Image: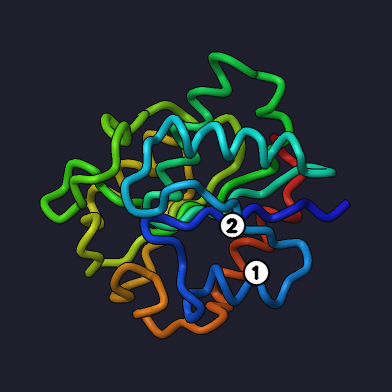
Amino acid sequence: MTATVLILPGLYDSGPDHWQSIWERTDAHCRRVVQRDWSAPRCADWVETLTHAIAAAENEVVLVGHSTGSLLVVFWAAYAAREEPAMLSRVRGALLVAPSDPDGPVYPPEPEGFTPVPRTRLPFPSIVVASTNDEYVTIECARSFAESWGSRFVNVGELGHINGASGLGAWEAGRALLNELQNSDTH
């Protein structure tokens, strides 16, 4: 059975040229999780919205986070482990792209509750993808996140924040990583 792909944009949502938006438009299995506040979010609100989206999915899900959307996945996993452990079995895997560093020098001040970033192993397969010239996270920080979350780490070179401005189009290399997680049977 094909997993539902939940698209989790970061701050300010993903614009029409962002690979997340392209995937959503071109793949019937992809659904964007729409947050109440994209510019000054509360982490607890985003976690609640994601919990409802996972519960409403007809089958297992693969989470595809970008930037703060990647952080959402680890905050949600920590919440679910404490409050709703059965929900964790609904997640087949997570693709965490360009996870922002909320303690970094250019992270916006408006988001609330996204620090400290949980550093516990994720209870499902995950892949962290990072760029060497991302202004929102150093490659060393992204690698450290991946190690603490038990994620496979993929360094894609100089692709900026791996977003619409990176000119990736449908980002076929990312799609291949998503397919790996969709076809994964391991929990």
Residue 112 appears at what percent x and percent y?
29, 36
Residue flagged by tag 2: what amino acid is it? Ile
Residue farthest front in this picture: 36
Choose top left, top right, bottom left or bottom right for residue 71. Answer: top left
Image point (67%, 41%), residue name? 53
Residue 7 bears which disc, if any?
Answer: 2
Choose top left, top right, bottom left or bottom right for residue 50. Answer: top right
Q: Which residue is mark 1?
A: 24
Residue 34 appears at what percent x and percent y?
56, 52
- Does residue 140 appear left or right of residue 5 in this picture? left
Residue flagged by tag 1: what amino acid is it? Glu
- Does residue 24 appear left or right of residue 68 in this picture? right
In the rendered image, which quarter contains the C terminus? top right
Q: Considering depth in this image, is 122 or 106 the residue closer to the camera?
A: 106
Residue 86 vertical position relative to residue 46 in the rendered view, above or below: above
Image point (73%, 71%), residue name? 27
Regarding mark 1 in the picture, which secondary structure is present there? helix
